[in-house]
Amino acid sequence: MTLTGIGFDSHRFAPGRRLLLGGVELPYERGLDGHSDADVLAHAVIDALLGAAGLGDIGEHFPDTDERFRDADSMRLLATVVESVIAAGLQIVNVDCTIVMEEPKLGAHRAAIRDRLAGTLGLDSARVNVKASTGEGMGFVGRGEGVAALAVASLEQA
């Protein structure tokens, strides 16, 4: 049996912050605002894994009201979730992601993001897909106010 989960997250841009996507820092004049490091892609992947495993959501595991998670490294949070998934007797089959943003363009960073996610997930890079899209000028993404990410994760019994 294959278990599937979907994750979504969005964060607004803010000055003086780093722009991290899937654990990779992208050079840009603004970063994303959030309680942790605001890695919107890592957060979407976390929710996809938790959803597929029936283990709740990111807010239950790492609440933004808990100071322990202020400026937390989201890739470490992801690694913790991977451990929970494995402890539940499941294995990750694949993860497919979409980052939605107007700028900066993702192309030059896509392979690094894919490799970083794959390493944290314990998967071959061929089992992790990272796509990019824009808001086509519509909504908060289209106006350049922030970034959104979606992820789908498939799990099987180990």
Image (cartoon, rainbow, N blue to C red):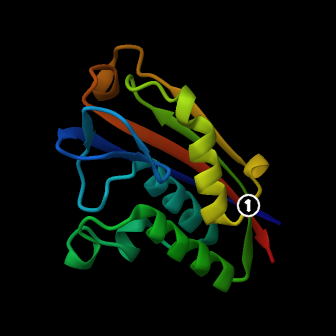
Which residue, as the protein is rendered here, is positioned at the far top?
A: 137
Report helix, strand or loop for mark 1: loop
Residue extending farthest to the front is 27
152 over 52 or under it: above or below: above
Q: Give the image location of residue 34, x and y in percent.
A: 24, 54
Question: Is residue 68 found left or right of 21 in the rendered image?
Answer: left
Q: Quadrant of the N terminus?
A: bottom right
- Crowd band around label 1 with a 10 angstrom C-alpha radius: few (<14), some (14–19), many (20+): some
Q: Position of residue 148 (x, y in %)?
A: 40, 38
Position above or below: 59 against 152: below
Q: Report the residue at 50% width, 29% height from top.
A: 106
Q: Which residue is mark 1?
A: 123
- Residue found at x 47% / y 63%: 75
Please tell me in which quadrant of the rendered image residue 117 appears: bottom right
Front residue (pair 36, 96): 36
Q: Quadrant of residue 144?
A: top left
Name the quadrant containing residue 29.
top left
- Relative depth, front residue between 116 and 97: 116
Q: In the rendering, at what x and y percent does residue 58 appear?
A: 41, 66
Percent x, y for residue 7? 51, 52
Residue at the (33%, 20%) spot, across then down: 142
82 relative to 15 in the view: left or right: right
The residue under label 1 is which amino acid type?
Answer: Leu
Q: Quadrant of the C terminus?
A: bottom right
Camera-side residue: 36 or 110? 110
In the rendered image, the vertical position of residue 57 relative to residue 135, given as above or below:
below
